[in-house]
Structures are given as structure tokens and as C-alpha cells.
Image (tube, rainbow, N blue to C red):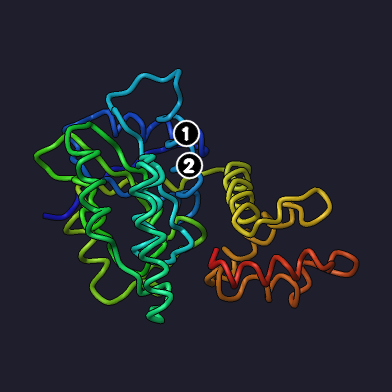
Amino acid sequence: MPPEKIEIEPKNIDAAAGEILGVLEDTSKGNLIYFKGWYGFGASAVLNLVAQRLKSSTRQNKFDIVIHVDCSVWKSMRALQKAIAEELELPHSVMAIFDRCEEEDDFSGIDEGSRGVIADIRREIFRKLVNSIFVVVFHNGSRRYIDLYDCGVPITTFLSNMMLWTWHGRFRVDLDRILEDGEKGKMKSQTDVLLYASPQLEDEEIRDLLHEEALEVARCAGIVKPDDISHKIVTECLIYMTKIATDLKTHAPNYWICDGIIQGQCISMGYWQFSAQKHVLGC
């Protein structure tokens, strides 16, 4: 059965987070909720804010546990499972299993991207969550649909647990160019609700949205410093990217510099560092 499509009409990141929290409180909507953002923009920033509010001690909600896992920069299923275990604050004796398995894989020459989940950790995660009402906020940076049950997270239609997630939430507009064959269809068959934000925004609202995306870019690249690169410049670059309709990860830093958006004295080491960092991190 295809997912239920729900259009929300927020004018900014803050309003979108508020509307999504309302959807999460409505148990009739299903367990698995996908947020597309504004044609792919803003999804990561919205999920970050949703997780922050869910974890706030001042906010009452129905969930015993909130798990926020940002794997926008994809490494492996092992890294995903470890991020979940860290969020759950599993005992040191359990976390030590990761170190032992990493040493064994290093010795065997298994590359990082091929390292899978650990069965013992899977059981520990399941035991921690099976009797709880929880929500997972998940940024999936991989090229395929991820069933978190593989990591030990029991999200099923028979329980009240939920997952809010996005795919390549930072700066990926055209998923068809990124995902492996058949993965988009798998996502639709496994997801209960497809949430997307109405694109009907005023120019100033679009600029504010891209400003938030720019902050995400800078944080992801690790260069949010007063003397390094201005997120205002990145905002202009994002606007430019929307006009040339290309994938930001692949070409944007080159276009920004070579097309003259970043000119003269602005071409400092910070900008070249940003370009290099984006290619390395896959932001």
C-alpha cells in the first residue's frame, strides 16, 4: 500500500517542526513517517529541531525514549548501529564489543563501508527498547532504504513506536540520481506517511530557509568560524544552485568559485577548504 501523502504549509523551519510534532502525536497515522522538506531542502534542519524539542525536559510527550541518529554523512551499518547504541547509553561492557569487532575487522582488512551490524549489540538494543514507547529521528545518508530492525530497533505496526526520517536530508534534491535501483519503491512500500512542505513560499521565506541550510552546510563541513567562511555567502551559493539545478555535493563548490560568485579577495583558504571538505564529507 502506498504511503499517505500529507502536505503541510509551514513558512519556516520552526513551524515545520511544530506541525511534524503534531503528526507524531497522532497514532492513527502509522509508525514510519518520511519528511521530504521543501523539494528536498530543509529536511535535515527540521529533523534536528524536532529531535531537540522531543528531548526537551520541558515538553511533555508520549515517548519514553527519543533516539536521534544523524547519518547524513554515511559510513556503514556498523556506524549506524553504534550511533544508536550511544544514544541509548548502553553499558561500557556492551560498547566495548564495538572496539573488539573493529580491531578484528582492521586485522582482516575489511573496509569501513562494508562493516555490518553486530548480533550481540542487536540483541542489547532490542532488550533496551522492546518494553518502551520510543521514537527514532533518523537522517539516512545511504543510497538504500534502511530497516532499523537490522540494528535491533523494533519498529512494527503492532507497537506504538515511531520513526521520523529523511533521505539525504542535506542538499539532495534529485534522489533518483543518488539511490540504488529499486530503493525508492522499497521506501514507498515500507513508509506509512509521506510528509512534504508546500513550496508556496515568498522570496524572503525562501531566503530564510536557505539560510538555515547554509548553517547546516557550514556545520557539516566543520568551518563555522568568524574569520573563515560566512554562511551568508553559502546562502547565496545555495540560491545559485537552485537556479542551475545541479547536485550540490558534486559541483557546487567549483561553480561558486569559477563562475565568479566568490571573487577576488573572498577566495581565501577558507573557501577552498570548504570546497574540499564538502567533497570529503559528502555534505
Which residue is label 1 attached to? Answer: 52
Assess disc 2: are there few (<14), some (14-19) or many (≥20) residues with their C-alpha within 10 Å of its C-alpha.
some
- The quadrant of the image that shows the C terminus is bottom right
Q: Secondary structure at mark 2?
A: helix
Residue 197 seen in this snapshot: no
131 vs 176: above or below: above
Residue 22, position as x, y percentages in the image? 32, 29
The three-letter code of the residue at mark 2 reads: Asn
Q: Is residue 19 left or right of residue 211?
A: left
Q: Residue at x 56, y 66 (%)?
A: 281
Q: Is residue 8 left or right of residue 281?
A: left
Q: Nearer the viewer, residue 76 or 140?
A: 76
- The quadrant of the image that shows the N terminus is bottom left
Residue 44, position as x, y percentages in the image? 47, 49
Which residue is label 2 attached to? Answer: 48
Image quadrant assignment for residue 266:
bottom right
Q: Residue at x 13, y 37 (%)?
A: 159
Residue 259 seen in this snapshot: yes
Residue 221, position as x, y percentages in the image? 63, 59
Q: Nearer the viewer, residue 110 or 200?
A: 110
Contact (Cβ within 8 Å) of mark 1 with mark 2: yes
Q: What distance separates the C-alpha of mark 1 from that of mark 2?
A: 6 Å
Q: Residue at x 45, y 55 (%)?
A: 169
Q: Residue furthest bottom?
A: 109
Question: Mark on residue 253?
Answer: none
Question: How many numbered badges does the structure rendering display?
Answer: 2
Q: Residue furthest right?
A: 265
20 vs 94: above or below: above
Residue 267, position as x, y percentages in the image? 83, 69
Q: Secondary structure at mark 1?
A: helix
Q: Residue at x 36, y 44 (%)?
A: 137
Assess disc 1: are there few (<14), some (14-19) or many (≥20) residues with their C-alpha within 10 Å of its C-alpha.
some
